[in-house]
Each structure stands twice: as structure tokens, then as C-alpha cells.
Image (spheres, rainbow, N blue to C red):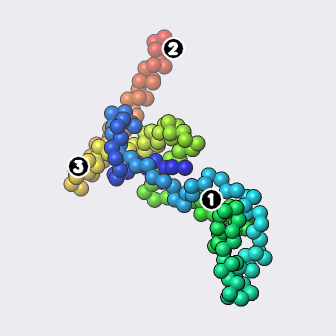
């Protein structure tokens, strides 16, 4: 599973993700991701607490090397690899998949599930529009003095209020036209 991350570090996308905006993105592997997509329970069925205990408290030091490395199906199994079947839900892969993303990446990360990259990009575009990333990108392109920032905030606030009133007035006109005035 991969995560697509939008940020200031990465490579420039070859196509616009948001209308007329080029957004930086980076594809990064998920934390604690293993190469195996599924864990084979049949390989772990022989493991239990007694075997784990016998490996930890071996009868003598001269037998310890044979207990540390068990040879099964041409694969070496070490004491550290033995886990209980109940421990599979507490594996780092499962914990990482269930942990919510917080911090800087919280609103800029989507999961690519089952190789569906187009669906992931669509959800990323949706996140970009919701979070006004394009507007923020344009706003933060150049440094503005604090006084200019406050003036811009006032202008934006008044513009939003005017637009809201204008839309309300247009709705009144449309309603009157619909009634036949």
C-alpha cells in the first residue's frame, strides 16, 4: 500500500491535479510495510508459548545454537521470528494501518488501495479543493509584510460578505422571475 503525499518536497507533477495548478507530490512507501501481502498462518501454527519458552530458557548453553535456529521448509526460523497467532493483529503493519495520520500530512495524504491510482488521485483532488491548497499555494508564493497580510484578510472578509449578499439578491430575483414578476 502506498501513500501519495502533497507537500513542498518532491517532484513536479506532469499534469495539473487541480484546475490550472501544478502541485508538488511524492509517492512514499507506508511505514512498517512488509513485502508479503498476507501472513501464512500455516507456517505459524506450530508456534506456541512452550516452544518460545524452551528457546528462551534452553536446557544448556551447548544446545542453544540448535534451538536458536530451526530449519523448516528450507527456511531458517529464529527465536525472534516466533509469534503467537493472536499477536498478528498487533504487528507493526496492522498498527500502522490503523493509526490515524496527524500533523502536517493529515489533510494531504490518501491511500492507494488495490492499485487504484486513478481513484486515489480523484480523492486527492477532492482533498485539495476542500482544503483550498491552490489558493494557499498562490498566497504563500511571496513574502507579505504583516500589515499587508492583515489588510488582505480584511479585503477577503469583505469580499466574501459581498458575494454572499449578491448571491442572495440573485436568488430573490430568480424567485421573483419564476413567480412571473
Cα–Cα span, label 1 and label 3: 42 Å
Q: Which residue bears the numbered disc 2?
A: 179
Q: Position of residue 176 (x, y in %)?
A: 47, 17
168 above or below 7? Answer: above
Give the secondary structure at mark 2. Answer: helix
Figure disc tally = 3
Name the residue nearer the viewer: 164 or 39: 39
Name the residue nearer the viewer: 51 or 101: 51
Give the secondary structure at mark 1. Answer: helix
Crowd class of label 1 (few under 14; some 14 to 19; many from 20; radius 10 Å): few
Residue at 33% x, 33% y: name it: 20
Q: Nearer the viewer, mark 1 or mark 3?
A: 1
Crowd class of label 3 (few under 14; some 14 to 19; many from 20; radius 10 Å): few
Disc on the earlier residue, 1 or 3: 1
Q: Which residue bears the numbered disc 1?
A: 94
Figure quadrant of residue 90: bottom right
Residue at 39% x, 46% y: name it: 25
Cα–Cα span, label 1 and label 2: 60 Å
- Residue 142 badge: 3
Residue at 43% x, 29% y: name it: 168
Q: Is mark 1 in CB contact (under 8 Å) with mark 2?
A: no
Residue at 53% x, 47% y: name it: 111
Q: Position of residue 116 (x, y in %)?
A: 54, 39
Q: Position of residue 163 (x, y in %)?
A: 37, 33
Res. 134 visible in picture? no
Cα–Cα span, label 3 and label 2: 50 Å
Name the residue nearer the viewer: 160 or 46: 46
Q: Position of residue 19 (x, y in %)?
A: 37, 33
Give the secondary structure at mark 3. Answer: loop
Amino acid at each position: 500500500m502506498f501513500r501519495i503525499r502533497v507537500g513542498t518536497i518532491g517532484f513536479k507533477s506532469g499534469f495539473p491535479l487541480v484546475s490550472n495548478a501544478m502541485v508538488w507530490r511524492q509517492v512514499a512507501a507506508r511505514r512498517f510495510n512488509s513485502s508479503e501481502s498476507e501472513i501464512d498462518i500455516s507456517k505459524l501454527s506450530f508456534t506456541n508459548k512452550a516452544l518460545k519458552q524452551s528457546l528462551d530458557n534452553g536446557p544448556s548453553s551447548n544446545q542453544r545454537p540448535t534451538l536458536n535456529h530451526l530449519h523448516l521448509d528450507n527456511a531458517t526460523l529464529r527465536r525472534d521470528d516466533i509469534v503467537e497467532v493472536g499477536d498478528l493483529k498487533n504487528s507493526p503493519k496492522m498498527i500502522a494501518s490503523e493509526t490515524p495520520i496527524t500533523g502536517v500530512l493529515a489533510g494531504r495524504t490518501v491511500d492507494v488501495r488495490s492499485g487504484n491510482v486513478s481513484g486515489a488521485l480523484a480523492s486527492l483532488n477532492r482533498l485539495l479543493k476542500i482544503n483550498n491548497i491552490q489558493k494557499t499555494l498562490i498566497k504563500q508564493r511571496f513574502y507579505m509584510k504583516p500589515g499587508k497580510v492583515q489588510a488582505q484578510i480584511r479585503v477577503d472578509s469583505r469580499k466574501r460578505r459581498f458575494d454572499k449578499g449578491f448571491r442572495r439578491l440573485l436568488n430573490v430575483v430568480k424567485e421573483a422571475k419564476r413567480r412571473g414578476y
